[in-house]
Image (cartoon, grey):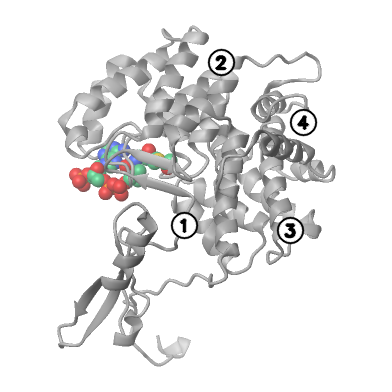
């Protein structure tokens, strides 16, 4: 019924664009299953002009059936399922299956998928030597960009992007190996030995084991902390056409292999305006240092000296639904670890209170985002702040692969090639160096 309605609207609705010289063009209006209508600009070139939209505020770069966000209403769906329901009832591998395949798995499908992922958790042993080439103090994201990209030098048997079986195996390899590489980056940085994956553990338990265990001690996962990390992974698994996902799609549109594309996504995620926000938020808390300085710091934000990291979002102009889930998880973890009275966490809660009641933030619809709380949870779990963006990359890998797969599977996809508004020099003749 919904499809029929969309079909009808697409066939009959047009927008007319008229130039100042009187020429005009009729542009079809397309409707999705949810969300605002979209004007199809593909034929605009007939007028000899194109659109200018540098940060993509008004541009849909693709069609997708994976994730839907309504930022004003504070909604996030994966394949139609509200994020709150998935965070409450599902686990990360089930969510990964859903993102990749479009449907929740049956019990048998889930068991088979889990077994396949576990089968791929180890990396080629030669990869361990890669790490020796990095300085010990290298940022783990620098290591991730390099080593994940290097997977393409190890798995030649799955690089034919036009072969669906190759795409499937690459997806499994990335989902399974990125946590192993992330944990290796952490171990290398801290000087501890690498821990091989242990498949008796769940996906998240295994990741925590590779991060925190040492060969000298038995490792017993704490279920409250495992659940918290599971939630962080679920909440960060996909988020529509954000900067890193768009980067993965753009890199993939040229036919680059998936390992190279995911490495490009990791690079884009690194920045403080995107995946680096939870690290930046924690660093900011440390810089503030004490509850008594919150007021003064917030005044600096209002005077535009700096931004409050972990606040605001390009799309959510209401409470980010992921932030609500993460906030609850944050309180659970602090209570489990008896950290409610910890200075840093007290400071974070005071900052949240002040910002949520201050007109500067209320008027601009600046709510704490998911990274404000995930940074606090990750710190409480004992994860160092330079690993925060890496954890985000571990979570987002499945979203990137699902989006890449969707694009490559679309027979109509073409290389992405934005245009530009040129404002450089007009034609001029070369002047020899002695006459300049
Ligand atoms: N602290 C203080 N003021 C802010 C903040 C902030 N964190 N974010 C936005 N503003 C203000 C701006 O100064 C601007 O004020 P003005 O109207 O007086 O000029 C207004 O709010 C709108 O800001 P924009 O930059 O237009 O908002 P945009 O949607 O482009 O920015 C962004 C979104 C980049 C996330 C921004 O809010 C920000 O820098 N936040 C801090 C970094 C952060 O937490 N990033 C994580 C995003 S979530 C993620 O990647 C998963």
Q: Mark 3 packing: few (<14 Cα in 10 Å), some, or many (20+)?
A: some
Give the CA separation, mark 4 to mark 2.
21 Å
Residue identified by numbered label 4: 197
Tell which of 192 and 352 is nearer to you.
352
Dot 3 or dot 4, earlier in sequence:
3
Specify the quadrant that holds the C terminus. bottom left
Q: Helix, strand, or loop for circle 1? A: loop
Dot 2 or dot 3, earlier in sequence:
3
Q: Is residue 390 visible?
A: no
Residue identified by numbered label 2: 224
Tell which of 131 and 151 is nearer to you.
151
Give the CA separation, mark 3 to mark 4.
24 Å
Dot 4 or dot 2, earlier in sequence:
4
Q: Report x, y in % for residue 221.
A: 67, 16
Residue identified by numbered label 3: 166
Q: Quadrant of residue 318?
A: top left
Q: Residue furthest bottom?
A: 429
**Could you tell me which residue is drawn at 47 percent across and 40 percent down?**
276
Note whether 21 is above or below 376 in the view shown.
below
Dot 3 or dot 1, earlier in sequence:
1
Q: Helix, strand, or loop for circle 3? A: helix
Give the CA separation, mark 2 to mark 1.
34 Å
Specify the quadrant that holds the N terminus. bottom left
Residue identified by numbered label 1: 64
């Amino acid at each position: 019924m919904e499809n029929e309605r969309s079909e009808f609207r697409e066939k009959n609705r047009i927008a007319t664009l008229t130039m100042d010289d009187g020429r005009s063009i009729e542009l079809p209006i397309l409707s999705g299953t949810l969300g605002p209508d979209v004007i199809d600009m593909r034929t605009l070139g007939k007028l000899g002009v194109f659109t200018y939209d540098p940060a993509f505020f008004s541009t849909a770069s693709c069609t997708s059936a994976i994730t839907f966000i309504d930022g004003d209403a504070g909604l996030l769906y994966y394949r139609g399922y509200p994020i709150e329901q998935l965070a409450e009832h599902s686990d990360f591998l089930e969510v990964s299956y859903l993102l990749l395949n479009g449907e929740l798995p049956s019990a048998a499908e889930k068991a088979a998928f889990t077994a396949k992922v576990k089968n791929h958790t180890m990396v080629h042993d030669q990869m361990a030597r890669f790490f020796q080439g990095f300085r010990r103090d290298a940022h783990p994201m620098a290591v991730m960009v390099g080593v994940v990209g290097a997977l393409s030098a190890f798995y030649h048997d799955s690089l034919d992007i036009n072969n669906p079986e190759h795409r499937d195996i690459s997806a499994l390899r990335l989902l399974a190996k990125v946590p192993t590489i992330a944990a290796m980056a952490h171990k290398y940085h801290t000087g501890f030995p690498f821990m091989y994956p242990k498949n008796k553990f769940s996906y998240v338990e295994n990741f925590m084991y590779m991060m925190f265990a040492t060969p000298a001690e038995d490792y017993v996962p704490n279920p409250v902390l495992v659940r918290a990390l599971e939630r962080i992974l679920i909440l960060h698994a996909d988020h529509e056409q954000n900067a890193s996902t768009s980067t993965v799609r753009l890199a993939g549109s040229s036919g680059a292999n998936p390992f190279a594309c995911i490495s490009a996504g990791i690079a884009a995620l690194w920045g403080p305006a995107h995946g680096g926000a939870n690290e930046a938020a924690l660093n900011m808390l440390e810089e503030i240092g004490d509850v008594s300085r919150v007021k003064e710091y917030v005044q600096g934000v209002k005077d535009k000296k700096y931004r409050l990291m972990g606040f605001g979002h390009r799309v959510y102009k209401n409470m980010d639904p992921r932030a609500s889930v993460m906030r609850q998880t944050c309180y659970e973890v602090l209570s489990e670890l008896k950290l409610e009275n910890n200075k840093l966490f007290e400071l974070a809660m005071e900052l949240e209170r002040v910002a949520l009641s201050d007109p500067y933030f209320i008027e601009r619809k600046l709510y704490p985002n998911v990274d404000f709380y995930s940074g606090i949870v990750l710190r409480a779990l004992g994860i160092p702040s330079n690993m925060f963006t890496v954890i985000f990359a571990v979570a987002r890998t499945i979203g990137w692969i699902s989006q890449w797969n969707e694009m490559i599977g679309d027979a109509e996809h073409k290389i992405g090639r934005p245009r530009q508004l040129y404002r450089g020099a007009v034609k001029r003749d070369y002047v020899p160096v002695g006459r300049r």
